[in-house]
Amino acid sequence: MSVMKMMLRAVAGCGLMIAAAGMGSCGDGGNGAGVAGTTIKVGSLNSMTGLNSTFGQSSDKGIRLAAKERNAKGPLLGKTVEIVTADTESSPQKTPLAMLKLLEQDKVCTVLGEVASSRSKAAAPEAQRNRVPLLSPASTNPTVTQIGDYVFRSCFTDDFQGVLIAKFTAENLKINKAALLVDVGNDYSTGLAKVLEAEFPKLGGTIVGRENYSAGATNFKTQLTNLKSLNPDIVFLPGYYTEVAPIVNQARELGMTCPFIGGDGWDSEVTLKMGGKSLEGCYYTNHYFAGDQDPKVVEFVAKYKKEFNGESPDAMAALGYDAANILFKAIEDAGSADPPKIRDALAKTKDFPAVTGSITIDAEWNAKKPGVVLKFEGGAIKMVTRVQP
């Protein structure tokens, strides 16, 4: 038996002992999971440390801001919302243990998270097994919600995002010759690449070549040299911010002048800070833009900056905030903190007026919502267009 399995069994065993001592299952009586005395416990499953920690920290802040605002409105079912955070350490391997901590020890009635698709897929089986709703704010890989009917997302999927990237490249940029650079160990990256490989040719485009890398790598010159020899007019880079800037910087050092285009995984202040002028003329799709003058966005940005010492909210913060508010509305509509009742209410979410756009949960537990295309220009990020689902 692996060390991980031993640890998981230990945590599960601890949870069973707690249940045997009278904690019981989640319900409305005040003794069940998620309902302890005067509080309703909600889990925040996020990468607070590790390689993608800015994602998790931003999402958790958005969730906590939403909870603070909800509590300020008055009791939810007569109780105060309590957010309990578990750190996945940016690791799919460590995510199940963090999820079990929330379920078995903290006794939450529902979980918000994870941001990364690989980690949501690692957590989802535990949510399904325990019949506790898991609502991911930002996992875009289509297979996440296919794990079970207790697994939801409040963001768009890569089926939408990939088509958006392909169409924008072919129809707006008038480019039909592209190359792919993919993080092969990342479900988000490989899933988005799969959509691009299927959709771009339908629009008259050609993908002249593909190179792979792994998260945490620092030298990409071999892959970039191979791609440069193919003379693409653009490079699809469906990766995370941790590698985007180093890749584009090294591409410029090799004399590659074509633009790169990616997805929401690029969204971090780290990208622009590290990439600088190398990113000029590059694009990425996202869930929202902090500089958008839509009243909901303007209000959210102001509140977030006030709460977190002037820090500007990235997309993960906005998505965490939206997911939390959708959940609180579901609990209110259910009239209960019982997980199955919350699940049923989440499934009925329709036209929710979120910061990142109107959100409706469909029959496959995915969100129908808009997206935006952003561009690096003049040392800043600007919004090019908004696209409805």
Image (cartoon, helix red, strand yellow):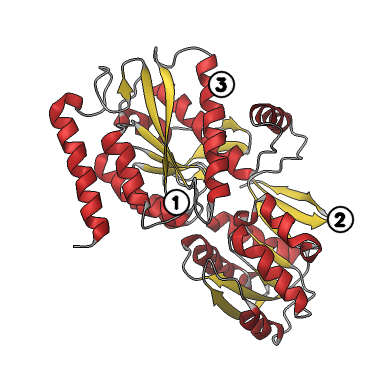
Report x, y in % for residue 92.
Answer: 40, 57
Report x, y in % for residue 121.
Answer: 39, 54
Q: Residues within 10 Å of mark 2 (few under 14, many from 20)?
A: few
Marks 3 and 2, how far apart at CA:
36 Å
**Amino acid type, residue under disc 1 in the picture:** Glu
**Amino acid type, residue under disc 3 in the picture:** Glu
Report x, y in % for residue 129.
Answer: 25, 45
User: Which numbered disc flags the more N-terminal residue, 3 or 1?
Assistant: 3
Q: Is residue 90 above or below residue 45?
A: below
User: Which numbered disc flags the more N-terminal residue, 1 or 2?
Assistant: 1
Name the mark on residue 202: none
Q: Residues within 10 Å of mark 3 (few under 14, many from 20)?
A: few
Q: Is residue 66 left or right of residue 28?
A: right
| Contact? badges 3 and 1 (CB < 8 Å) | no
Question: Which residue is denoted by mark 2 in the rendering?
Answer: 378
**Amino acid type, residue under disc 2 in the picture:** Gly
Report x, y in % for residue 275.
Answer: 74, 62
Front residue of 245 and 135: 245
Task: Name the secondary structure under disc 3.
Answer: helix
Name the mark on residue 69: 3
Q: Is residue 20 left or right of residue 257?
A: left
Q: Is residue 174 left or right of residue 334?
A: right
Quarter of the figure with the N terminus? bottom left
Question: Which residue is denoted by mark 1 in the rendering?
Answer: 89
Find residue 12 and report its image quarter. top left
User: Which numbered disc flags the more N-terminal residue, 3 or 2?
Assistant: 3
